[in-house]
Image (cartoon, grey):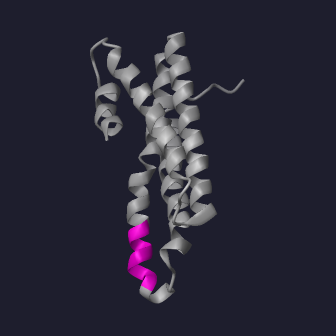
Amino acid sequence: MAFVLLTPVVLLRRSPAAWPQRLLFALGAVVAVTAYAMSSYSIGGWVERSAVLFFNSLFLFSLARAYWYMRRGDSLQKMRWMWRAIGILLGIATTRPVMGAFFATSRWTHLEPSQFFGVAFWIGFSINTMIVELWLRSREPETAMP
């Protein structure tokens, strides 16, 4: 929750204070470590676990790239990688309505939570990851063709 609450401060800040960014990176690392630990027990079995491991690793990679660019002084690339990391992390919020749809239709589909939790995780995280990536690519300056 602290990561999510601090995110707008970092993304929308106008002051040169660096401590919110550094705190966000530290909180992101804590979020990632706990996600790895929590994946040891998953309702959706290996499908859910694979989604958590894949997207958590992608989140950590994006966060590490953002940190690397911050250290190099490239604020544009830092923000692009921060947006990727945050989009992936907020995929858990997208997973909830997907699960709700599975729960709502389970009377007709006869699917149990152990059968749809993993699929819901893959769908929720994928939606956010694709939307953020498409948004970032739409904002890239056009390169001139020779």
103 versus 92 height, above or below: below
The residue lying toward the viewer, choosing from 103 and 76, is: 103
Q: Nearer the viewer, residue 138 or 17?
A: 17
Residue 70 on image: x %, y %: 49, 16
Q: Is residue 141 visible?
A: no
Inspect the magenta stretch and tell me whether residue 105 lies in it: yes
Residue in view at x 57 percent, y 26 percent: 65
Rendered location of residue 77, percent (x, y):
52, 23
Q: Is residue 21 left or right of residue 52?
A: left
Identified at 55% across, 59% down, the residue is 122
Magenta segment: 99-106
Q: Which image quarter holds the C terminus?
A: top right
x and y percentages locating residue 110 in the rendered image: 50, 86
Q: Which residue is the extreme one toward the bottom? A: 108
What residue is shown at x 61% (from left), y 48% (from top)? 54
Front-lying residue, 76 or 120: 120
Numbered marks: total: 0
Give the answer, above or below, for where 12 lies relative to 95.
Answer: above
Question: Which residue is most to the right?
Answer: 146
Which quadrant holds residue 93?
Answer: bottom left
Q: Quadrant of the N terminus?
A: top left
Coordinates of residue 39 in the picture (x, y in percent): 54, 52
Magenta segment, prevailing SS (helix, strand or loop): helix
Instruction: Kindly tell me whether residue 130 is visible in this rendering.
Output: yes
Vertical arrangement, residue 95 with respect to residue 142, above or below: below
